[in-house]
Amino acid sequence: MKKFLLLLCISTCSFVSYAQDADSYYKTAMEYKNKDNYTEACRQLTKALEAEPQNALYKSEMADIQYVKKTFFGSIPLYEEMLEKEPNNLLYLARLAEMYSMSPQKMKGVTYADRAMKLKPTDASINKMLARTYLEVKHYPKAIKQYQEAEKALPLDMDIPFKIATCYAQLTNYGEAMKYYEKAIILDPENGTKLYEAANSCYDANFYKRANELYQKAEDKGYYKSKTFYDNWALTCSEMKDYDKALFYYAKAREYAPYDKDLILSVAELYMKKGDFNKSREVIDEMLELNPNDAEAIYTKGMTFYKAGNTAKAEQYFNKAFELDPALKSLRYTKSNF
């Protein structure tokens, strides 16, 4: 009997000690978490869970930390396990939706998002996660709806208007996109990316003057310079019939891609719009030096003669272009330009 009591005492003491160790690890983990040291917090929680594998609090904290660390392969199974016990937990549903939407199993994310939607979430952070889920799978109408719900509670959020604008742009609703891009740059006026995307949207909505202003602001704020950046700006200036300024930005675009065929043709087209057909031919001849049998370049050179009134010379180039690329024959009667 004494031996049994001794063993029971030892067993009980060991259990208490083990529990104390688990609690100690947990408290240490929370200290690291409060200092944003999630890696060490995760290590301490792993030890706590080894001591108490079924502790719901430890699992919840581990899931949260893995989520913050973006270690989704670690947090997803924990959230799914906890969701079985709390099937209407909006935070679990929203996080699972968001994480799966960024994985190859995107539609599983939508399944969780749809479950969350049935619970009519009002929390802004939840709605942002659900909106991101729908954005990831390109369901733009649902994404817009959830971002707008989140915006009601977070009117000063710098990210939401930009995301809504992006969705509207993808739906080719450039007018609405422009409105939200404008809101985005009011909230975040130093952000070059938002200024650039707002400029693009203004161009698509035919607000060329505003687009030109925003391209300038984007450049001033240090937005990444590239062929595309200056090409888009040049197109805007061309639509405003400010051809000299357009040529200036095409020249900048060509600094990044000096032999880009589309850029060269655009410059040639611009000189034609200015009525400077000789200069247009000089530009085309640069391209023909690289490829004498480029049908588009030959056709465009023919256009310089056609627009100058020399139809006989134009037909020589048109016919040569049609021989090289019969698909261009559809342009014979329209005399369209590229």
Image (cartoon, helix red, strand yellow):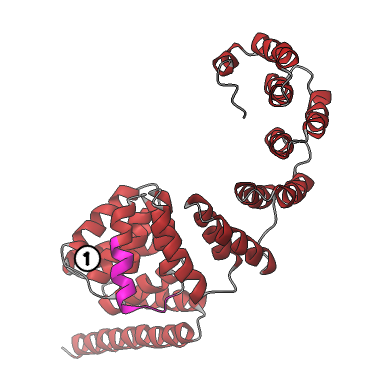
Residue 182 seen in render: yes
Location of residue 250 in the rendering, given as x and y in whole percent from the top left corner: 73, 46
The secondary structure that most of the magenta stretch takes on is helix
Q: Amino acid at mark 1?
A: Leu
* Span shown in magenta: 145-157
Residue positioned most to the front: 309
Q: In the picture provided, is 198 more to the left or to the right than 26?
A: right
Secondary structure at numbered mark 1: helix
In the picture of the structure, the residue carrying the numbered disc 1 is 83
Q: Is residue 50 magenta?
A: no
Determine which quarter of the picture holds residue 208. bottom right
Location of residue 81 in the rendering, given as x and y in whole percent from the top left corner: 25, 64
Determine which quarter of the picture holds residue 78. bottom left
Residue appearing at x 27%, y 71% in the figure: 91
For the residue pair 43 and 313, the one nearer the viewer reads as 313
In the rendered view, tell whether residue 13 sits above or below residue 164.
below
Determine crowd level at label 1: few under 14, some 14-19, many 20+ residues with C-alpha closer than 10 A.
Answer: some
Q: In the picture provided, is 137 more to the left or to the right than 192?
A: left
In the rendered view, tell whether residue 10 sits above or below residue 42.
below
In the rendered view, tell whether residue 257 sits above or below residue 97.
above
Location of residue 29 in the rendering, given as x and y in whole percent from the top left corner: 43, 83
Residue appearing at x 73%, y 26% in the figure: 308
Residue appearing at x 17%, y 69% in the figure: 86
